[in-house]
Image (cartoon, coloured by chain):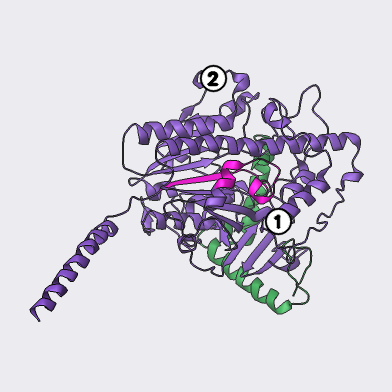
């Protein structure tokens, strides 16, 4: 396996089993950190909220604050 | 026989006496260290002198040289998520700060709240989370909480963002003419004023916690002309040459192992120096000079603060953490020179763009708002003369911005409560790095992120990166670090 912190070589296709185990572990983590966070508990709900926030920003205070994050 | 006993008694007594003295010294509780957390804003992985950068940063370089330079340290790719995790030790998703300012008091407490009572809690600079610092455990606050401000704003709305202890900071508070006023200088001034008023003048033995959240070197590109002039010639040979120069220095400094990280062409778009027009070349030469001057200015002002601490005998028992909230930013504007003004002056609002970000994040891929190494990788400098195990090392120990909170709790010898002021607290996602700061061997870490369309996970020296978690346009990448 080559080492590459510059992330130019994708090893996913040659190590599918590693990818699978990390995908699974990520999904478990995401579920655990999103628990109790109402806006994140359901994906569709989250998307709705994000859409609302985006809309508000576009209508409201202009782009400055949004951009500075 | 009698004689022997006598001798034994004598020996015992002689041995015990110094032992008792030593024991008494050890048992006397050591004063808790002061805590100083310094956060740079949008600083690239390769911007500091000690990381191979072009800016002269002698004060921070000296911290690294006499402390520990962590080169595999990670933030959360963007202002609010990084700041929320730094203050609470939790993943931004737990507190709704995965994109916006979140609500830190929902399931979390800040470092200032954890230290309150035992420490004097002070803050200057950018907050970018909610609620405000004075509501979240800080006793004193100066700064603009949200947008980056350098010169005194020409926009009235922005002026109102600048706060001093819960009221609006105004021109009457200035000690220099408006034209000369520069935010970073004021950050350092107020850091020292707060320390003078709350610590030195009170003659207290109570340790302090100071959170110094700079706006530098976040755009708009603005810096004193004398600082910019130091760097105008540095980028004459172009951005490709600058990347190469930084990479070579990083290899020489032992930060990058050329066997495991090459300097490859990493951008999808071709941004080669030769493809630029004369005006674009002039633009990037100046833009990078201003950005570099801003990193230099950060170091100058921090140098004043460190001198102040030394003068007041507060430096040696202060644990200092320094890092950036995310990588350099590729948020871009047209590469045209400001009309009738010099870039960097008050009122100009230029940026280094994707072209400059690639230099600042050398040799990493990506930039702010991505989970590539260039988005989340930051140098982390730890310095504490009284408590560090093995000074002067470059550590490959992986760590996360979530680790700072539990590390500080450990330093202050405090426990994380399950509840605070009626708030039930979530578990911490970070872990204390105190053993590693005191020279324990490297431990393998599992670090996880989600930012917009990116998901990422690091396990040991493996990193998995995925675009679009909802399955649309999903692409996966695996790299070893």
In the rendering, what colour is chain A?
Answer: green
State the mark number for residue B171.
2
**Residue at the image position 65 percent from the left and 76 percent from the top:** A21
Label 2 crowd bin: few (<14), some (14–19), many (20+), radius 10 Å: few
- The picture places residue B137, in percent across and down from the top left corner, at 41, 43
Q: Chain of mark 1?
A: B
Colour of chain B in the rendered structure image: purple
Is residue B166 rendered magenta in the image?
A: no
| Whether labels 2 and 1 share one chain | yes
Nearer to me, B300 or B75: B300
Q: Nearer the viewer, residue B51 or B413?
A: B51
Q: Chain of mark 2?
A: B
Q: Residue furthest left?
A: B2
Per the image, the residue denoted by label 1 is: B252
Q: Residue at x 91, y 45 (%)?
A: B274
> Where are the magenta residues, as a range?
B34-62
- Residue reaching furthest to the bottom: B1
Residues B455 and A7: in front is A7
In this picture, residue B421 sits left or right of residue A11 = left
Is residue B328 in sight in this rendering?
yes
Number of the front mark, 2 or 1:
1
Q: Quadrant of the N terminus of chain B?
A: bottom left
């Amino acid at each position: 396996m080559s080492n590459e912190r510059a992330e130019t070589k994708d090893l996913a296709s040659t190590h599918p089993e590693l990818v699978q185990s990390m995908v699974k572990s990520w999904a478990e983590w995401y579920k655990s950190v999103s628990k109790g966070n109402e806006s994140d508990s359901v994906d569709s709900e989250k998307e709705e909220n994000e859409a609302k926030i985006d809309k508000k920003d576009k209508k409201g205070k202009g782009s400055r604050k949004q951009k500075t994050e | 026989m009698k004689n022997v006993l006598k001798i034994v008694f004598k020996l015992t007594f002689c041995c015990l006496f110094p032992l008792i003295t030593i024991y008494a010294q050890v048992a006397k509780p050591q004063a808790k260290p002061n805590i100083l957390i310094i956060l740079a804003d949008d600083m690239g992985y390769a911007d500091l002198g000690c990381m191979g950068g072009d800016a002269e940063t002698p004060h921070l370089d000296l911290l690294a040289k006499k402390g520990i330079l962590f080169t595999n340290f990670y933030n959360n790719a963007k202002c609010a998520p990084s700041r929320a995790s730094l203050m609470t030790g939790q993943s931004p998703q737990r507190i709704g700060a995965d994109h916006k300012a979140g609500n830190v008091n929902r399931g979390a407490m800040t470092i200032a709240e954890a230290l309150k009572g035992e420490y004097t809690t002070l803050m200057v600079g950018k907050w970018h989370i909610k609620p405000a610092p004075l509501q979240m455990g800080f006793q004193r606050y100066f700064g603009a909480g949200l947008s980056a401000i350098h010169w005194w704003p020409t926009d009235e709305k922005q002026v109102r963002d600048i706060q001093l202890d819960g009221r609006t900071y105004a021109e009457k508070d200035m000690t220099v003419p408006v034209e000369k006023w520069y935010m970073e200088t004021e950050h350092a001034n107020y850091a020292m004023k707060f320390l003078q008023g709350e610590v030195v003048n009170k003659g207290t033995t109570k340790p302090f916690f100071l959170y110094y959240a700079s706006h530098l070197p976040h755009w708009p590109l603005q810096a004193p002309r004398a600082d910019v002039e130091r760097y105008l010639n540095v980028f004459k040979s172009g951005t490709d040459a600058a990347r190469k120069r930084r990479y070579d220095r990083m290899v020489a400094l032992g930060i990058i192992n050329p066997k495991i990280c090459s300097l490859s062409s990493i951008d999808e778009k071709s941004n080669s120096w030769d493809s630029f027009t004369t005006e674009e070349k002039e633009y990037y030469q100046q833009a990078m000079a201003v950005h570099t001057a801003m990193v230099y200015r950060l170091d100058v002002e921090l140098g004043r603060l460190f001198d102040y601490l030394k003068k007041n005998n507060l430096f040696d028992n202060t644990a200092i953490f320094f890092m950036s909230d995310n990588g350099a930013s590729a948020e871009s504007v047209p590469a045209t020179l400001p009309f009738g003004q010099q870039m960097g002056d008050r009122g100009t609002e230029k940026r280094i763009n994707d072209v400059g970000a690639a230099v600042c994040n050398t040799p990493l891929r990506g930039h702010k708002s991505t989970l590539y190494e260039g988005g989340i990788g930051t140098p982390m400098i730890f310095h504490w003369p009284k408590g560090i195990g093995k000074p002067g090392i470059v550590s490959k120990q992986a760590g996360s911005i979530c680790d700072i909170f539990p590390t500080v709790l450990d330093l202050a010898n405090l426990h994380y409560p399950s509840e605070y002021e009626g708030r039930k607290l979530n578990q911490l996602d970070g872990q204390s790095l105190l053993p590693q700061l005191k020279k324990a061997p490297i431990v393998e870490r599992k670090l996880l992120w989600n930012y917009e369309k990116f998901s990422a996970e690091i396990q040991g020296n493996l990193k998995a990166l995925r675009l679009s978690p909802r399955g649309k346009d999903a692409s996966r990448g695996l790299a070893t670090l």
